[in-house]
Image (cartoon, rainbow, N blue to C red):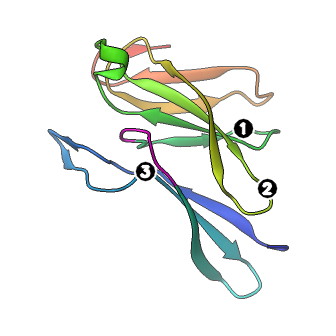
Amino acid sequence: MTGCCFLFAGTYTRKMAHVNGRAAGIYVYSWDPATAGIKPVHTATGIVNPSFLAVHPGLPVLYAVSETDDYDDKCNGAVAAFAVNPVNGSLRLLNMRQSFGSGPCHVSIGKKGDVLALANYGSGSIA
């Protein structure tokens, strides 16, 4: 897939008060700038409501919130890190941790990639 790049789409996989989620997870598409063609190449499943995504500035890592309030049987959401295969765009789960609040809705990575900030909509908190 030389010359292409990857596009990542976060989705809702579970019904919530504001959305009737029915997607499978994180969708990965290849984009060829020479032809402007977009095609699906991978779907990462196993994460609930990966509604917001952020790419690490220097590593092939994608972060995703898990917009829920029941991660690990606690009143928390979660954030996950995925390794991005630079050849085919496939995602491999590296780890998942609680968001220390419910309904995480935004994740951001610092310029140097050494800080991750997370906003929890449900609990009105940051981590």
Does the residue at mark 3 contact the one at mark 2 (Cβ under 8 Å)?
no
Which SS class for mark 1? loop
In the displayed structure image, the side of residue 19 where residue 2 appears, left or right:
right
Q: Which residue is drawn at the image coordinates 43% and 50% (left, top)?
A: 25
Q: Which residue is drawn at the image coordinates 80% and 39% (left, top)?
A: 59
Disc 2 target residue: 86
3 or 1: mark nearer the eye = 3
The tag earlier along the polypeptide, 3 or 1, is 3
- Which corner quadrant of the image does residue 83 belong to? top right
- The three-letter code of the residue at mark 3 reads Gly
86 or 9, nearer to the observer: 86
Q: Residue furthest bottom?
A: 35
2 or 1: mark nearer the eye = 2
- The three-letter code of the residue at mark 1 reads His
In the depicted structure, whether residue 24 falls above or below residue 3 = above
Q: Is residue 124 visible?
A: no
Disc 3 target residue: 25
Q: Which residue is drawn at the image coordinates 25% and 44% (left, top)?
A: 14
Q: Main secondary structure of the magenta part?
A: loop
Residue 89 position, x and y percent, is 69, 59
Q: Which residues are magenta?
A: 44-49
Residue 66 position, x and y percent, is 41, 33
